[in-house]
Image (cartoon, rainbow, N blue to C red):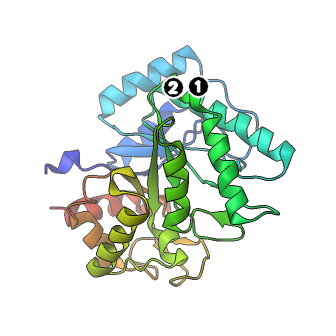
Amino acid sequence: MEQQKILIGAHTSAAGGSPNALHQGQEIGATTIQFFTSNQKQWNGRIITAEEVAQWEKLLDETGISQVMSHDSYLINLGSQKEELLEKSRNAFLGEIKRCHQLKVPYLNFHPGAATGATEEACIETIIASLLACEKEVQQGTTRLLLESTAGQGTSVGHRFEHLGTIIHEVRHKIPIGVCIDTCHIFVAGYDIRTLAGWEKTLAEFDEKIGLKYLMALHVNDSMKPLASKRDRHAQLGDGEIGIDSFKAMMQHPLLREIPKYLETPDPDFWEKEIKMLRDFAT
């Protein structure tokens, strides 16, 4: 596989407009990026103008960056049992989908939800209902929704593959759906990916509980916290509990090397170096 076709990037900043995320991606040698289409800590979504769309499309062509992924707002909880929060979350999520359609973003990554004051089962049922309620809007474009694997911190669901598999099974015929594995999250959730053998075991379970055809993207992060700690603290690659051998195995694995990968490691100053390192691992 040619190096330039290996899709590796990071979550770049769209401050001042979405095209700036592409500029930063180009500066760090990224071939793909993740970004927020709006402020991730505000309910009111940003308006994307026709001029911004034109600039975005021009830069996509100039930079060659592809398979871009958006990350939804941290405020959204599609599994909330609180009526007001659930309504706000569903409306905000529709806004996320609309902005992705405007920019023709291939993937919208989102945290499944949290079981605030309810069982995991009730939360998962609510997430399914929330996604099905988006069917009409999703069909207006080509964006695929990606469930992000979670760390299991607090009352969040999605830290077990069976959670994600249940959701996908119920919506797959109506919603374009997939999964983004976060390496830090699955590690602290209890999936040991520190070695090639660990990756093989993890992927076998993913295939059994979800189906490998639904694995569409990877968030690439080391972990400050140990295996099965359920504590979500990202670290630079090789500086955490997962270790560099895991990421070498990831880049060389035939089921993983061609999947788009997005760094969310804490210090952007290291992204260019980390992207180069991952690309070198794949050669």
Which residue is tagged 2? 139
Name the quarter where the C terminus is drawn. bottom left
Which residue is tagged 1? 136
Q: Residue at x 14, y 49 (%)?
A: 2
Q: Is residue 204 left or right of residue 225?
A: left
Q: Is residue 25 left or right of residue 117?
A: left
Q: Is residue 35 left or right of residue 215?
A: right
The answer to which quarter of the image holds residue 5 is top left
Q: Amino acid at mark 2?
A: Gln
Give me the C-alpha separation between circle 2 and circle 1: 5 Å
**Label 1 crowding class (10 Å Cα cut-off): few <14, some 14-19, many 20+?**
few
Can residue 275 be seen here? The reply is: yes
Q: Amino acid at mark 1?
A: Lys
Residue 169 in the image: state x and y as whole percent: 49, 50
Q: Nearer the viewer, residue 1 or 263?
A: 1
The answer to which quarter of the image holds residue 233 is bottom right
Q: Does 158 appear above or below 98?
A: below
Residue 209 in the image: state x and y as whole percent: 43, 64
